[in-house]
Image (tube, rainbow, N blue to C red):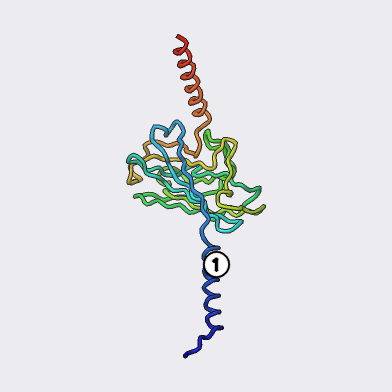
C-alpha cells in the first residue's frame, strides 16, 4: 500500500485555508442608496434620479460612484456646479482622482475640480462637493472618486458618509435629457436631487396632512 505524505497534504490544506481566508477578508464592503427627491426644477420628472455606491476598500479608503438612472424615457446626467456632493463622516480626508464617463453621443465629461464644502440648493451644506467644467455637453452618467480618511477609520461602508443638517447623505446637479443621451439634443430641465426631500417639500406635505386632518374632524362633528 502506498503511504500518503502527511506533511505534503498538511501544507496543501493549509494553503487552501489561507486562500479561503484571504478571499473572505477581501470581500467587498458596499453600501448603496438612491437620490429619490428632486427640487422644484426637476420634480415633474419622476425619480429616482441616480444611485450612489460606497465601496469601502480599507478602514481608511473608500470609492464613491454616482450612476445615472433612466426613468420614463429620460436619463438623469450629472454636471456643472455641485455636480456631485457627499457629506463625509470624517474630521479630515483627502480626495483622490475624479473620473467621469458618459456613454451618450457628443459628450466630453469634465474636467472636474474639488469644490470643497458647499450649500447644494435646498438640501443643505455638504462637506465634499465636486464641480464639472461648463454645462450639459460636459456632463457625465457616472462619476467616481476615492476618499481617504486622515483623521480616523470607517467601521463599514455605511459609516463612510453621515447625514448633513437636512438629513442628506448625498446630492447631485441633474440634467434631464431623453434617453439615449445625445449632446446636441440639449437638456429638458436642470436641477438638484438628494436622498431626502427639500425642507419646503416636507413642510408642504405636513401642512397638507394637517389640513386633511382638520377637514375630517369638522366633517365628523357635523
Left of 57 or right of it: where is 183? left
Where residue 152 appears, x then y in whole percent? 66, 53
Query: Considering the numbered disc 1 on the image, is that residue within a helix, a strand or a loop?
Result: helix
Where residue 126 appears, x then y in whole percent? 57, 41
Q: Is residue 183 above or below residue 220?
A: below
Left of 20 or right of it: where is 73? left
Left of 216 or right of it: where is 165? right
- One can see residue 30 in this view: yes
Local crowd size for mark 1, using a 10 Å CA cut-off: few (<14), some (14–19), many (≥20): few
In the picture as drawn, the residue positioned furthest to the bottom comes out as 1
Q: Is residue 25 above or below residue 151?
A: below
Where residue 60 appears, x then y in whole percent? 61, 56
- One can see residue 111 in this view: no
Q: Which residue is mark 1?
A: 21
Q: Residue at x 47, y 37 (%)?
A: 192
Where residue 46 appears, x then y in whole percent? 39, 36
Q: Residue at x 63, y 48 (%)?
A: 90
Q: Is residue 33 above or below residue 24?
A: above
Of residues 119 and 199, the one drawn nearer to the viewer in this rendering:
199
Position of the C terminus, as image quadrant, is top left
Q: Is residue 16 above or below residue 171?
A: below
Amino acid at each position: 500500500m502506498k503511504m500518503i505524505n502527511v506533511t505534503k497534504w498538511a501544507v496543501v490544506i493549509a494553503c487552501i485555508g489561507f486562500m479561503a481566508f484571504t478571499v473572505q477578508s477581501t470581500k467587498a464592503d458596499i453600501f448603496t442608496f438612491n437620490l429619490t427627491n428632486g427640487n422644484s426644477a426637476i420634480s415633474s420628472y419622476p425619480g429616482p434620479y441616480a444611485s450612489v455606491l460606497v465601496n469601502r476598500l480599507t478602514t481608511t479608503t473608500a470609492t464613491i460612484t454616482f450612476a445615472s438612472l433612466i426613468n420614463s424615457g429620460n436619463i438623469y446626467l450629472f454636471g456643472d456646479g455641485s455636480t456631485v456632493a457627499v457629506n463625509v463622516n470624517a474630521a479630515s480626508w483627502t480626495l483622490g482622482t475624479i473620473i467621469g464617463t458618459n456613454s451618450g453621443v457628443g459628450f466630453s465629461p469634465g474636467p472636474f475640480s474639488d469644490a470643497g464644502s458647499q450649500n447644494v440648493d435646498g438640501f443643505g451644506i455638504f462637506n465634499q462637493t465636486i464641480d464639472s467644467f461648463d454645462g450639459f455637453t460636459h456632463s457625465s452618467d457616472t462619476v467616481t472618486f476615492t476618499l481617504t480618511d486622515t483623521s480616523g477609520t470607517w467601521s463599514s461602508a455605511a459609516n463612510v458618509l453621515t447625514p448633513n443638517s437636512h438629513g442628506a447623505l448625498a446630492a447631485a446637479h441633474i440634467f434631464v435629457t431623453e434617453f439615449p443621451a445625445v449632446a446636441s439634443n440639449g437638456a429638458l430641465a436642470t436641477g438638484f436631487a438628494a436622498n431626502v426631500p427639500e425642507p419646503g417639500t416636507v413642510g408642504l406635505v405636513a401642512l397638507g396632512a394637517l389640513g386633511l386632518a382638520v377637514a375630517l374632524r369638522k366633517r365628523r362633528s357635523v
